[in-house]
Amino acid sequence: MGKRFTLFTGQWVDLPLEEVAELAAGWGYDGLEIAVSGEHLDAWRVDEPGYVESRLEILQRHGLGCWTISNHLTGQAICDDPIDFRHRAIVRDRVWGDGGAEGVRQRAAEEMKLTARLAGRMGIDTVVGFTGSSIWPYLVMFPPVPAEVIEAGYQDFADRWHPILDVFDEHGVRFAHEVHPSEIAYDHWSTVRALEAIDHRPAFGINWDPSHMMWQDLDPVAFISDFADRIYHVDCKDTRLRVGNGRNGRLSSHLPWGDQRRGWDFVSTGRGEVPWEDCFRALAAIGYDGPVSVEWEDAGMDRLHGAREALEFLRRFDYPAPTAAFDAAFSQQSE
């Protein structure tokens, strides 16, 4: 069976799911990674008669599959501190409520539990998303931050996510955390520590997205090997670096996406510096056979062009594995 290429709908929630499905099918995608956002999916409607069936019917009508759903935006609010105007812009009114910080976190956790139920009802075993982090604001470690504050941040993550993961276990669903700056796990060592905090329970794994690794100088290929048993999902997004001129820094100077003074930018898959060939060979080596999802983001390219082009680029890596060692013929003795 070849690779299953999907389109992540998070950057397309301004369009109805029906329209996104029609576009993706026309471009040749095998399925969608549907965002629990906007009109695409609403976890609070999971028990509404006919709701899940209506979403699946859209996919079926366009000949598409769905092997993962994603809830990044709500997940961000589960551990974050502070809860502020940024969260108000991304979570549902039902989660925001009166805007009281702890209430927002609790309602976000409830929506994530409902997302596990929704996945189970849809016959899906993986949910991709964010966790948020109460200690991300202390990244620079100045003014000085005591070690116990950082430890408390990982404990806060564990305390809030263990009950959520209990619900995931009940429904036979896994959570694939996207390793990403502003989350509890954003690089190699913070991923190690987050997995330790959560007791390495199987319900919690990783959504591998190399774009966030590139500008941090992480090796996305080594990350696959190091966390081989935790790669539950793959998102494909690319990054172009513009550092080295003595002006553009890794932290990007509060400049908007696409500004040429930034030290890096997200670009359409295949247009940046991710070593895709090596990455796909590493994924094959660990036996990853899940979907490969295009998360399209590029401030300098129209998305209708980019989504099609990204799929065409990635199909280059959908070649069959060998059935024998390439040098096996050398050992055959002639009669």
Image (cartoon, grey):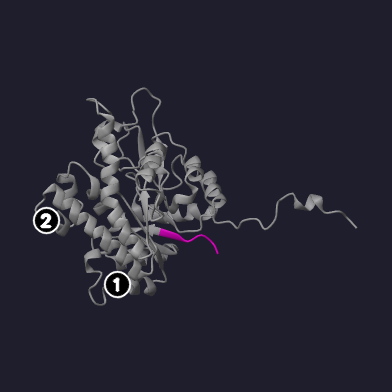
Q: In the rendered image, which quarter is residue 86 located in?
A: top left
Q: Nearer the viewer, residue 87 or 236?
A: 87
Q: Amino acid at mark 1?
A: Val
Bounds of the magenta segment:
1-6
Q: Nearer the viewer, residue 160 or 245?
A: 160
Examine the rendered structure and indicate whether residue 65 appears above or below residue 290: below
Does residue 259 appear in this view? Answer: yes
Q: Nearer the viewer, residue 193 or 282?
A: 193
Q: Are marks 1 and 2 in contact (CB under 8 Å)?
A: no
> In which quadrant will I find the N terminus?
bottom right
Task: Name the chief secondary structure element in magenta.
Answer: loop
Q: Which residue is mark 1?
A: 52
Residue at 54%, 62% (x, y): give it: 2
Q: Rate crowding at label 1 as few (under 14), some (14 to 19) or many (20 or more) other CA atoms within 10 Å.
A: some
Callout 2 secondary element: loop
Residue at 17%, 56% (x, y): give it: 95
Q: Which mark is residue 97?
A: 2
Residue at 32%, 44% (x, y): give it: 299
Does residue 256 appear in this view? Answer: no
Q: Amino acid at mark 2?
A: Gly
Q: Is residue 239 left or right of residue 318?
A: left
Which mark is first along the chain, 2 or 1? 1
Q: Is residue 106 left or right of residue 30?
A: left
Examine the rendered structure and indicate whether residue 194 appears above or below residue 73: above
Q: Is residue 231 left or right of residue 322?
A: left
Q: Name the residue at the top extreme.
A: 246
Q: In the rendered image, which quarter is residue 175 located in?
A: bottom left
Residue at 38%, 45% (x, y): give it: 195
User: How many marks on residues?
Assistant: 2
